Image (spheres, helix red, strand yellow):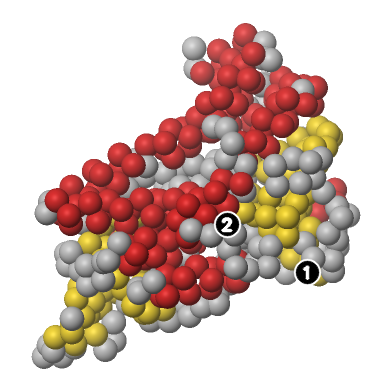
Amino acid sequence: MTTGASAHQVDRFDLIVLGAGPAGASAALTAAQSGLRVALVDKARFPRDKLCGGGLTGRAITLYSRIYGEPLPPVPLERRDSFAFHAFGQDLGESKDAPPLHLCMRFELDAALVRAALDRGAVDFTGCAGKLDPDGPAVDMSDRRLEAPFLIAADGVNSATARTLFGSSYDKDRIGFALEVERPGADPDRPLRIDFGAADWGYGWQFPKASGTTIGVGGVLARNNDMKAALQRYMDVLDIPDTLTVKGQFLPFGDFRSTPGKGRILLAGDAAGLVDPITGEGIAHALDSGALAAKAVQQALTVGTPEAALSLYKQSLRPIHRGLRHARLLRNLMFRPSLRPAFVRSFRNSRTLRSEYLRLMAGETEYGALMQKMISRLPGFAWRAMSGK
Ligand SMILES: Cc1cc2nc3c(=O)[nH]c(=O)nc-3n(C[C@H](O)[C@H](O)[C@H](O)COP(=O)(O)OP(=O)(O)OC[C@H]3O[C@@H](n4cnc5c(N)ncnc54)[C@H](O)[C@@H]3O)c2cc1C
């Protein structure tokens, strides 16, 4: 419904979704499908680029098909099932016929996700800059004001909404940072390569695709005072020329907000810090949390208690939060200098451990189960150090 106002027109909705990446698009689609009147706002017009390896794990594909009701996103995808693992300069072995990773270009994926949300009835405010009014909640644009009883903020790692609500978008002592280059030229037969420790408390990746190869390093920023040097070292190892354009972006890396919002504003995806601290994977949690936030809004509206939405959402995020906590624990084992040799030995000598890690990326197992397998292969001192006992 649209009503006139003295200066601006006011458009009223059941839900405003701010940010139309995977988290926002999935929230808008889920809410529109359940009959809510939804405004989907993004300052960018789609297709827009997003710095990302574009790796869709089995977990992301399963969530996509659950939310969108079709097996795969309608964009060009490259299916890969060969992986080469390295850690701290040592070769840990290859895995072939592993659960596959699908590679995509984010400008294509995100545009398709936005299209799907608009097709299901979300109202299009992409390409529109707006200012959040947290007391509404509302979004003020140059020619109109959007109002709704709920707002889902999926405005990414630099979330202006989180800054407005909590004083900062993220904790600068715990945030991650990643640098990437795109090397032109097809190299599709090379296995995907993952190098733990290419950045301190982080890793490097080489994802060959039909159109080029994405190479990057990412890790906890506070532990890497020169991420550019880490990228340069990694490119030297891979024998990549240093003439390519380097792009960088913050990455939450496991530093999630335990209360994902305030009042009737819910945070989803990177804005809520939902990125895996070991693999850097964020698309799956973005799709999942967007849909869960929309369901919490819908439930709160159904029972007529708007203030319940945040606690319903927080409850539904518990499995994701538990996985991220377990991953942070495991990261202690992988990256503490005193424990590295035990990690490298157990990962290199155990095909089971490597395949468990790949099953984890595929969403076929959880960090808790992987940790148990790892513990059984570790000397007691390592487990005690890792668990703080
Ligand atoms: C270098 C790098 C490599 C990565 N590789 C992978 C990978 O291979 N696989 C994987 O799963 N994850 C990867 N990730 C993580 C992944 O990119 C993110 O977790 C994911 O994009 C999060 O989705 P999102 O919807 O929360 O946020 P985003 O995709 O960042 O979308 C946020 C949206 O909000 C909009 N926005 C921001 N501010 C405003 C505002 N004020 N008003 C309106 N709109 C606004 C932006 O325009 C944007 O469209 C990588 C990240 C980095 C940095």
Mark 2 lies on residue? 71
| Figure check: 372 above or below 281 | above
Identified by mark 1, the residue type is: Ser
| Figure check: 380 above or below 183 | above
Residue placed at 35% from the left, 73% from the top? 122
Mark 1 lies on residue? 211
Q: Is residue 358 visible?
A: yes
Nearer to the camera, 346 or 358: 358
For disc 1, the neighbor class at 10 Å (few under 14, some 14 to 19, many from 20) is some
For disc 2, the neighbor class at 10 Å (few under 14, some 14 to 19, many from 20) is few
Cβ at disc 1 under 8 Å from ligand 1:
no
Q: Secondary structure at mark 2?
A: loop
Which circle, 2 or 1, is nearer the viewer?
2
**Res 316 quadrant in image:** top left
Residue placed at 59% from the left, 15% from the top? 383
Identified by mark 2, the residue type is: Pro
